[in-house]
Image (cartoon, rainbow, N blue to C red):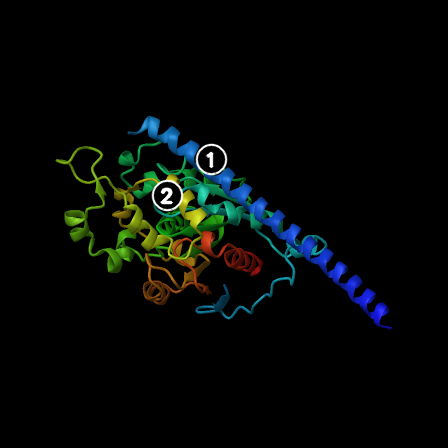
């Protein structure tokens, strides 16, 4: 009896050991794949940074129906289940999602979101705004919101006549989304503002950040973060935060590797577009379908400010991502992905 019991225990231990080794190998493989993805992204960012330098010295909660009585369409239990994808995609009328980065960022910042959306079967496209990412325009020459938004407007104008997109704008990129809604509303099925400057008629993108940075007038007179591309005797042309300031404002919840990627990829913020006042009409912008995603641990655009934007300029629906900073595609990419898929499903 004793020997048989011992042998059984020994067999169980061997099987458990094999199972543990398989789990460990799977974990190591996942970590290696993630490490490779980060290395590739970082390598690409460094290469782009060098090129530019040569030229120029979770959980998720939801609030829907602030102005609508639409009912919730639940997500499939497993988005990654390929057997469910065809039926799931049939319910989505607009599959093309255009991602617009915020100030200082570029198309590169959406690399996690793009991968997740593609795995779902949607068609994401990330654009570099003028003077951002790998667009070689000198940021000092980007003086208006029209200039800044040109890549987005060009993209929308070149869409087939009967095609629409879901437009997603992050941070100050929200102003570009608002500009597009006013000028090309028929090309946009839905607009998503991700911790973004969802401003009202006559406002400037900078006005949204005023509670964090001070008034525009005071900021342009006293800020140490201003850059003067045309000389110190000329008006400031851009904003470039120091590393410590940037980390505190944008990346307080983001993984260290992603912060390293951002630090070698971010470019000066053109000041002119931030100070441009938008004209938004009830007939165009006012009839658009807008959704807002709040980030609840955001230091650049506080939850109180985001709540005020939603209250003053009510969208069709509001979503929230807990424990997320101002770069939720870094700290909470899965939560952002689920929300975008859910918005895409809303009839």
- Residue 216 position, x and y percent, is 20, 52
Res. 135 visible in picture: no
Q: How many marks?
A: 2
Q: Name the residue under label 1.
A: 44
Question: In the structure shown, which secondary structural element does the residue marked by tag 1 occupy?
Answer: helix
Of residue 261 and residue 209, the one placed in the foreground of this image is: 261
- Residue occupying image coordinates x 26% and y 42%: 272
- Residue occupying image coordinates x 58% and y 59%: 345
Which residue extends farthest front?
Answer: 2
Can you say whether 296 is above or below 224 in the image?
below
Which residue extends farthest top?
Answer: 54
- Residue 192 position, x and y percent, is 45, 55
Where the C terminus falls, by quadrant? bottom right
Q: Residues within 10 Å of mark 2 (few under 14, many from 20)?
A: some
Q: Residue 263 carries which label?
A: 2
Where the N terminus falls, by quadrant? bottom right
Of residue 160 and residue 119, the one placed in the foreground of this image is: 119
Q: Residue 174 carries which label?
A: none
Which residue extends farthest left?
Answer: 233
- Residue occupying image coordinates x 35% and y 36%: 131
Res. 94 visible in picture: yes
Question: In the structure shown, which secondary structural element does the residue marked by tag 2 occupy?
Answer: helix
Mark closer to the chain start, 1 or 2: 1
Of residue 174 and residue 24, the one placed in the foreground of this image is: 24
- Residue 324 position, x and y percent, is 43, 60
Relative to 333, 170 lies left or right: left
The quarter holding residue 193 reads: bottom left
The CA distance from mark 1 to mark 2 is 13 Å
Relative to 93, 181 lies left or right: left
């Amino acid at each position: 009896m004793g020997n048989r019991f011992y042998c059984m225990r020994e067999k169980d231990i061997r099987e458990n050991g094999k199972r543990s080794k398989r789990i460990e190998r799977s974990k190591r493989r996942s970590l290696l794949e993630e490490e490779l993805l980060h290395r590739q992204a970082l390598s690409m960012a460094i290469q782009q940074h060098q090129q530019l330098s040569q030229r120029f010295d979770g959980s998720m909660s939801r609030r829907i129906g602030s102005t609508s009585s639409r009912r919730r369409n639940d997500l499939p239990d497993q988005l990654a289940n390929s057997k469910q994808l065809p039926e799931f995609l049939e319910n989505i009328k607009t599959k093309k999602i255009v991602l617009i980065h915020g100030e200082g960022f570029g198309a590169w910042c959406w690399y996690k979101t793009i991968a997740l959306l593609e795995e779902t079967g949607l068609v994401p496209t990330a654009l570099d705004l003028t003077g951002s990412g790998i667009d070689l325009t000198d940021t000092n020459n980007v003086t208006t919101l029209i200039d800044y938004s040109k890549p987005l407007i060009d993209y929308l104008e070149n869409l087939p006549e009967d095609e629409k997109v879901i437009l997603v704008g992050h941070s100050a990129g929200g102003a570009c989304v608002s500009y597009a809604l006013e000028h090309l509303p028929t090309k946009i099925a839905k607009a998503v503002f991700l911790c973004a400057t969802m401003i009202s008629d006559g406002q400037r993108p900078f006005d949204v950040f005023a509670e964090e940075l001070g008034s525009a007038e005071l900021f342009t007179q006293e800020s140490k973060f201003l850059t003067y591309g045309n000389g110190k005797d000329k008006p400031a042309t851009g904003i470039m935060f120091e590393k410590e300031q940037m980390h505190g404002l944008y990346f307080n919840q983001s993984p260290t590797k992603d912060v390293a990627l951002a630090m070698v990829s971010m470019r000066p913020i053109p000041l002119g577009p931030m100070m441009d006042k938008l004209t938004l009409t009830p007939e165009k912008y006012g009839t658009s379908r807008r959704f807002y995603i709040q980030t609840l641990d955001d230091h650049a655009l506080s939850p109180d400010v985001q709540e005020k934007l939603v209250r003053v300029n009510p969208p069709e629906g509001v979503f929230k991502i807990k424990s997320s900073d101002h770069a939720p595609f870094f700290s909470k990419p899965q939560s952002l992905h689920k929300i975008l898929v859910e918005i895409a499903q809303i009839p």
